[in-house]
Amino acid sequence: MSGRKRALSRESPESVASAAEKRRMMASHAADSLDDMDAAAPVFRDKPVSFVRRSGRMSEAQDRAWAELSPFYLLPVERAAAATSVRAGTAVDLEQVYGRRGRLVVEIGSGQGHQIVSAAAADPDTDFLAVEVFTAGLARTMLDADREGVKNLRLVEANAPEALEHLLPAASVDELWVFFPDPWHKNKHTKRRLVAPDFARIAALALRPGGTLRLATDWQDYADQMRDVLDDAPGFERAFAGEWADRFEGRVLTAFERKGLRVGRDIRDLTYTRVSP
Ligand SMILES: C[S@@+](CC[C@H](N)C(=O)[O-])C[C@H]1O[C@@H](n2cnc3c(N)ncnc32)[C@H](O)[C@@H]1O
């Protein structure tokens, strides 16, 4: 396979892969078998994406949540070719979405939604948006949000860079959170990491001047990459003194952080301010 072909992202309009491939992806999560899968799937994007979409079997409760709760929580998205894409020129009207225009906090890769549901419940005056591609995680987020009576939260099932670039109006976001993004720790996969120069460009477009970008990871090499990328990004300035930021006090302890701590990794927080270049 040529180098260019290998670098392209593959995702079918309906799903990522066959049932057998999905089972294999579930088993490896971070796609040890990614190269095999790449060879089989069609090409829909010219950039690698930072996820391998896990279909995950939905429980009955999750299926019900999807049917009953998605009309309120899940924003409709106009797609381009891939299932998780966002068509250019389809920005939402935030006032219409939330019924007001408040502070907006966006979490990318919200997983099961523990962080964003807890934050939204604690701060009803702020609007929250979760961007995730993991369907079962989105269902779980809706169930928890509904149980907590959270009304100031919406969800988007989409590739986050496309959601930031095409779904959100420019300079509309007050805080952007990226907590424990997939580390893609193998050398041959680091090109899939979300926090890379093009992400910094897109994040700078979405954040308002003076807005805040918060990140956390338990993977030292990725923490170093995040800091290098954002130190070099024209639209961002460090909002911490010293090597790393203090732990964001608004961050709940998720399974990913707990696992990192359990195996003795340092948890790195980073905070940047959106500035005019
Ligand atoms: C390692 S998990 C961390 C989840 C959560 N932040 C936590 O700390 O529990 C990373 C999550 O990011 C999601 N993700 C990865 N790349 C994404 C992308 N480009 N757009 C949306 N979600 C993405 C994955 O599906 C996964 O649920």
Image (cartoon, helix red, strand yellow):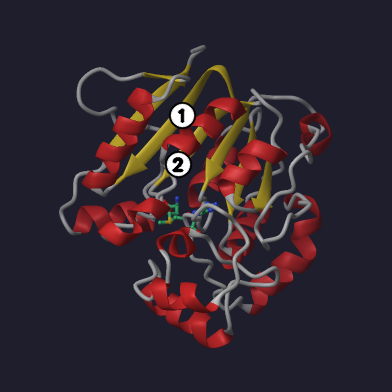
Query: What is the x, y in percent for residue 265?
Result: 18, 50
Using the image, determine if residue 24 lies above or below residue 154. Answer: below
The residue under label 2 is which amino acid type? Val
Using the image, determine if residue 154 lies above or below residue 250. Answer: below
Q: How many marks?
A: 2
Asked if residue 100 lies left or right of residue 39, the reply is: right
Residue at 42 percent across and 72 percent down: it is: 1
Q: Secondary structure at mark 1?
A: strand
Where is mark 1, residue-wise?
213
Query: What is the x, y in percent for residue 67?
Result: 78, 67
* Residue 266 occupies quadrant: top left
Where is mark 2, residue-wise?
178
Are circles 2 and 1 on residues that touch, CB within 8 Å? yes
Other residues around mark 1 within 10 Å, as few (<14) / some (14–19) / many (≥20): many
Residue 152: tell me if it is visible.
no
Asked if residue 170 lies left or right of residue 270, the reply is: right
